[in-house]
């Protein structure tokens, strides 16, 4: 990584190292292809058409999204197979139908009879059978039915009348609390066995279940057996972050995103260096606070993105970051004069990237050119 | 507040109640005018030209900003007197000079000899004396020189050679930890005495100091004596939030911002209601976590914005909020079916508003019309 093209950027700026991103994408493909499943990347992390082209198979999909806005933007960019992986509310079905009318095969997710009836009714009224996955709760994390909930078949039967029951979906969100490949593999198996059991229940009831979808970045990397699963979803693996490094899914060197910042002051008596990346740039995410190593608002690196020993952003105001040596460390504060450029590795790539309008991309082809990939947001 | 016009909005959506905003603006004016100071509102909270017109005196200024992007947008919209209140880095001086060349009287802030020399040099080279305030540290919060630091006069003398020494500035950021008007008034007096002492030091050295600037939302409301002060800065007072309610600067009823959300699911056994406002909508700000009452990711209100007893967003994923009864409360979970619209009051108005591209404004004139005021962001 050469710093020359970065020096001209106003700071704070979001930097994406394309070589690291490619490595991360290839790593998950290499792990999952032998397990016989499709990857359906979750584009909520990148929220960029340019980035999505590099993440998606053949540049076009399949894909997962977290908002209808994402479905609309990626759909318009040519992604034709999209899963909207947040429980559908009835008043969003009009937008779902508009997307389907434009040729995007959008699938919705639900876990209640009320939603299933709304989807079936909208399908019948429009003459367009809306495909739906039934959400299964594999770990008590958030939404979904227990795999043995009798409502599973009821919902399947409601969908079968007009809508299209496409299968089942789960997300082992609790795997984010599991440290190391062994613990994450156990979550992966729990995720698999719950969603496969639900699929079998539907099939036993004579209902179709072609799709069996699961995933989270930790379980996607740790899974050893995905029998019965058709597709795996993951999002943050494309960039990785300090949270994922903290649970050993990646190393700090794998993190493809950083925030470029400039030193704007010092409080030497307090051991502080003030930089122009505050929480508006880093986000308020403090996801590493409860991990074994608390990284504050981010790990501070030099201009070549080499981590500076024990240096983190200890506190952040809106546009000020306070850089200091990690509590308990004896490392002396380095001499970083006003104007020095630094990189900060983020706690949570999804949250930090969302603070910016685009990525300044260090090309993987070793050229000195910086590309710019716009991001979008909203709902 | 009528809900009719809100029902058509895709959720999550950012709602601004203009009547509450006006009341907040008038309250601070009514408090500060008798104290003989100018208000220089901090526009980092609103980041909207439409909102700024209502916040600023005569709609045009003076104003405070936290980024040069804000200065550029508000400058282009006709605000002519702008203070950029984050320590200047030398590589940003070119943009400062461009703004001044366009007729915007932009003032910078600094607290070091290196910055003062850079500002003086840029002023001499351009023939445009850049006005600067010297930052004073009144409470150990962040940046600034101690009021008795000998560098104060040194910096003033450097600025006097080519640049323009305009005065001194401080911000009692630690007042955010002070609960109640009495404790905040003590911070206000500490803020005042430090910055006035610094002004007197400069004047004794024969240096000019026409501006004596201080402020934070808590101290601006609590100050009883502002002798020697020329202007007060505050930002979040325009909207207020749960953090400010938690330290008794306002009530929950004063909060002008809310996030409109839709119920998308239930986990009845766990006492959870799932809504479509996750941290992407609310921000990751958990500022109330260390207050006497932890409000989670926000206080849940009904469609008419009446708080629902003890109901908060207890956890948040990217696009899912988990609503539950506050830990320890015996209040039963209300029956809120899928599709129900709710308002969530935010922990931190600056952070939550920054997650959205604009405000849907409930007009103060009791009409049913919703205005839309776009926001901007970036640096």
Image (spheres, coloured by chain):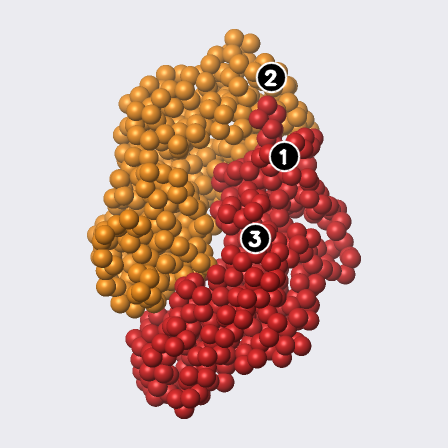
Chain colours: A red, B orange
Q: Position of residue A16 (x, y in %)?
A: 65, 55
Mark 1 residue element:
loop
Residue depicted at x 33% and y 35%: B247
Inspect this view and state whether residue A100 appears.
no
Residue depicted at x 57% and y 80%: A227
Check the residue under mark 1 and report the chain it is in.
A
Mark nearest the camera among 2 and 1 is 1
- The mark nearer the N terminus, 1 or 3, is 3
Q: Is residue A193 left or right of residue B30?
A: right
Q: Position of residue B303 (x, y in %)?
A: 25, 58
Q: Quadrant of residue A262?
A: top right
A361 or B360: nearer the eye?
A361
Q: In the rendered image, which residue does mark 3 sit on?
A: A243
Query: Can you say which quadrant of the picture contains the C terminus of chain A?
Result: bottom left
Residue depicted at x 44% and y 58%: B317
Label 1 close to label 3 by CB (< 8 Å)? no
Callouts 1 and 3 in the same chain: yes
Callouts 2 and 3 in the same chain: no
Mark nearest the camera among 2 and 3 is 3
Q: In the rendered image, which residue does mark 2 sit on?
A: B151
Q: Which mark is residue B189?
A: none
Q: Is residue A190 placed above or below B353 in the rendered structure?
A: below
Mark 2 residue element:
helix
Q: Quadrant of residue A133?
A: bottom left
Mark nearest the camera among 1 and 3 is 1
Q: In the rendered image, which residue does mark 1 sit on?
A: A329
Label 2 close to label 1 by CB (< 8 Å)? no
A345 or B366: nearer the eye?
A345
Q: Position of residue B365 (x, y in %)?
A: 23, 50
Q: Residues within 10 Å of mark 2 (few under 14, many from 20)?
A: some
Q: Is residue B310 left or right of residue A87?
A: left
Q: Position of residue A169 (x, y in %)?
A: 47, 74
């Amino acid at each position: 990584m050469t710093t020359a093209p970065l020096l001209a950027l106003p700071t704070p700026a979001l930097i994406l190292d394309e070589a690291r991103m490619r490595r991360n994408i290839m790593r998950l493909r290499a792990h999952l292809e032998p397990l016989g499943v499709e990857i359906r990347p979750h584009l909520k992390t990148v929220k960029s058409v340019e980035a999505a082209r590099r993440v998606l198979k053949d540049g076009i999909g399949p894909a997962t999204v977290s908002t209808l806005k994402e479905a609309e933007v990626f759909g318009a960019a040519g992604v034709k197979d999209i899963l909207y992986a947040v429980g559908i509310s009835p008043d969003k079905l009009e937008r779902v139908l508009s997307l389907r009318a434009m040729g995007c095969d959008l699938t919705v997710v639900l876990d209640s009879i009320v939603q299933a009836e709304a989807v079936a009714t909208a399908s019948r009224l429009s003459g367009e059978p809306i495909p739906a996955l039934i959400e299964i709760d594999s770990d008590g994390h958030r939404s979904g039915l227990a795999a043995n909930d009798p409502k599973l078949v009821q919902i399947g039967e409601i969908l079968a009348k007009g809508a299209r029951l496409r299968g089942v979906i789960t997300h082992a969100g609790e795997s984010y609390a599991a440290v190391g490949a062994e613990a994450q593999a156990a979550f992966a198996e729990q995720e698999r066995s719950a969603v496969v059991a639900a699929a079998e229940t539907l099939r036993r009831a004579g209902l179709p279940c072609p799709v069996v979808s699961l995933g989270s970045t930790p379980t996607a990397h740790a899974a050893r057996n995905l029998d019965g699963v058709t597709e795996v979803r993951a999002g943050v693996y494309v960039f990785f972050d300090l949270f994922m490094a903290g649970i050993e899914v990646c190393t700090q060197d794998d993190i493809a995103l950083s925030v470029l910042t400039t030193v704007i002051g010092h409080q030497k008596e307090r051991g502080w260096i003030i930089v122009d990346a505050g929480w508006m740039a880093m986000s308020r995410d403090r996801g590493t606070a409860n991990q074994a190593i608390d990284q504050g608002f981010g790990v501070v690196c030099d201009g070549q993105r080499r981590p500076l020993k024990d240096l983190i952003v200890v506190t952040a105001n809106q546009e000020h970051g306070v850089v200091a040596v990690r509590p308990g460390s004896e490392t002396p504060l380095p001499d970083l004069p006003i104007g020095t450029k630094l990189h900060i590795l983020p706690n949570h790539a999804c949250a930090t990237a969302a603070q910016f309008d685009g990525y300044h991309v260090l090309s993987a082809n070793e050229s000195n050119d910086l590309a710019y990939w716009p991001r979008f947001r909203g709902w």
